[in-house]
Amino acid sequence: MMNPLELIEKYYPLDGKTYPILVNHGRLVANKCFSIAKNKPDLGIDLEFIEQAAMLHDIGICFTNSPKIGCYGSNIYICHGYLGSELLLKEGYPKLALVCERHTGTGISKEEIERRKLPLPHRDMIPISIEEQLICFADKFFSKSKPYKEKSIEEIRNSLAKFGHESVGRFDAWCKVFL
């Protein structure tokens, strides 16, 4: 089994500000995923994959300009998903790369990228596999700036509303599947 911490340590100094933020956030998302998977065994969720993907879904934040979490890259935060995907592809983990690329918001369609003129590759970045969907869903409950406060369903819905009805609709559909 690939150890996600070894890969994180390759890109994030242990004594840096970002390492504990990234690892703690990944652990919270993983624990939320495990809790859901335990209550929904019929979904057949791959727990080993969930462990790795939850820990690595935000590995691309180091390429963004997000000083509050110790990141001083040249890209805006919305780019962290596809940049993390490129990093994981380079490292030889294509399935994990898909989770990085598809977890932002509730996923972002090519049409939305083009309509909003987002600085992202023009392709669909929407979670497909049950594991991708679960990580994307669980990620919405935790912020890196307030790591130990789990958001309520209403807080998440209100936050997603600014991105349109599609985002809220995907989240609501996941609530029916996962809760």
Image: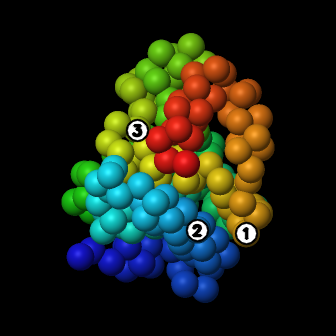
Left or right of residue 100: residue 150: right
Q: Amino acid at mark 1?
A: Tyr
Circle 2 packing at 10 Å, graded few (<14), some (14-19), many (20+), is many
Secondary structure under tag 2 reads helix
Secondary structure under tag 3 reads loop
Is there any visible trace of residue 100 in the rendered image? Answer: no
Label annotation for residue 28: 2
For this orientation, the residue located farthest to the bottom is 15
First in sequence: mark 3 vs mark 2: 2
- Which residue is disc 3 drawn over? 127
Residue depicted at x 43% and y 44%: 133
Q: Is 140 drawn above or below residue 124 in the view shown?
A: below
Label annotation for residue 148: 1
Between 135 and 95, the one nearer to me in the picture: 135
First in sequence: mark 1 vs mark 2: 2
Left or right of residue 73: residue 156: right
Residue 37, located in which quarter of the rendered image? bottom left
Residue 6, located in which quarter of the rendered image? bottom left
Point out residue 101 in the picture as x, y percentages from the top left corner. 42, 43
Q: Are marks 1 and 2 in contact (CB under 8 Å)?
A: yes
Is there any visible trace of residue 16 in the rendered image? Answer: yes
Spatial CA distance of label 3 from label 2 is 19 Å
Q: Amino acid at mark 3?
A: Pro
